[in-house]
Amino acid sequence: MNDGLPTTMAALFKPGPVAGLQLIETPVPHHGDDDVLIRVLLTGLCGTDLHIHAWDDWARSAVRTPLIPGHECVGRIVATGSAVTGLHEGQIVGVEGHLTCGRCEQCRAGARHLCLRNTNLGVHTDGVFAEYVAVPAANVWVHGDRVPLEVASIFDPLGNAVHAATTHPISGMSVLITGAGPIGLMAAQICARMGARAVVITDISSYRLGLAEHIDVTPATAPQAGPDELRAAGGTPLGFDIGLEMSGAPEALQTMLDAVSPGGRIVALGLPSKDTSVDWADISTRMLNIQGVSGRRIPETWRSVAALVANGLDPSFVITHKFRYDQHVEAFATAAGGKAGKVLLDWA
């Protein structure tokens, strides 16, 4: 029982294996001894949420229903479990959406991002598209007083960008980024800030490439810009030193493979929506290095994100639309339409 709090809340609900979400009234979740209860203020719409909303092939294979989706948020702690220490009511917090077991070999080695029993908030268990959410205290990140709420609401995807952009040393390197969604744009901003010699970002959306004008990078339209044009744009005749594949599009991955230099390093974060084939002989003979990246290192990436923001990084340029939660139909249509950056839902 949550004394002094409402007993019911508004939430976006996926009742079963069908497209769309329903706005419902549902009980406020119970929080256990090791949990905190958070009053959600802002949530971000992620590509994962669009998959769940559309109920596409990926969602059918990965998502359990019934479900309250959502994993990007900022909120205020309103109650803490009896075993929780170091957290208190009133703190403004974010949530790490990977719910790790803490007991497997990977977790015990300090690699929680590789947990063998990981479950995902808003994918395998009820998430943040609601007025309240209960989460383990170990998954809470306390924001500093100077972090604007809108920026705090995108620490999760900003963490993806930081994780990808810092996989390899960036200073003095030429970087190609395929996919100018919010994570790709933030990764481009980070690479430029960390001293990359050249940063080129591609997308099929002229709207999203327009957002790149806010940062010191070179936008290029795909697929019109082929490998030769991209190398010319980056001033890298031998090819790019580092590639960040953020789109999940098979065509973008092939462009990336063609545009990086021999011995180049590719970080793959985008999730393909269909089968993708590559020329492994080319990868072998050109000695390319491909590194998969998912989520954030816990808690190292959160610390890095907080430090970057505290030292002047402002990723708010990727936020283009904000809707009230009862405008969710319009919000999802906007996010899926290609003429938006990050779309937020306001639950305050």
Image (cartoon, grey):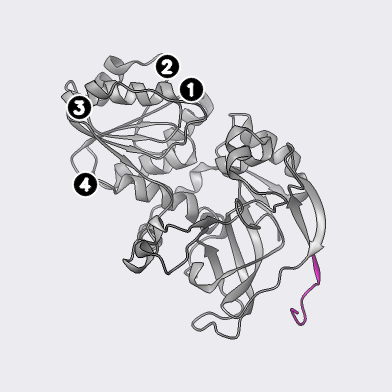
Residue at 21% over, 31% down: 288
Disc ID at residue 223: 2
Q: Quadrant of residue 10?
A: bottom right
Q: Which residue is mark 1?
A: 204
Which is nearer the N-term, disc 3 or disc 2?
2
Say if mark 4 contacts mark 3, CB within 8 Å: no
Question: At numbered mark 4, what does the secondary structure look like: helix, strand or loop?
Answer: loop
Residue 180 within the magenta-colored segment of the rendering: no
Which is nearer the N-term, disc 1 or disc 2?
1
* Residue 248 position (above or below residue 47): above
Which is nearer the N-term, disc 1 or disc 3?
1
In space, the residues marked 4 and 3 are separated at their CA atoms by: 22 Å
* Camera-side residue of 129 and 100: 100
Q: Is residue 141 visible?
A: no
Q: Is residue 111 visible?
A: yes
Residue at 54% over, 82% down: 84
* Camera-side residue of 238 and 207: 238
Q: Position of residue 57 (x, y in %)?
A: 60, 32
Q: Which residue is mark 4?
A: 169
Question: At numbered mark 1, what does the secondary structure look like: helix, strand or loop?
Answer: loop
Q: Which residue is mark 3?
A: 284
Question: At numbered mark 3, what does the secondary structure look like: helix, strand or loop?
Answer: helix
Q: Position of residue 69 (x, y in %)?
A: 65, 51
Provide the major secondary structure of the magenta segment.
loop
Which amino acid, by three-letter code, is at mark 4? Answer: Pro
Q: For the magenta stretch, what is the residue range?
A: 1-8
Residue 2 within the magenta-colored segment of the rendering: yes
Which amino acid, by three-letter code, is at mark 1? Answer: Ile
Which is nearer the N-term, disc 4 or disc 1?
4
Say if mark 1 contacts mark 2, CB within 8 Å: yes
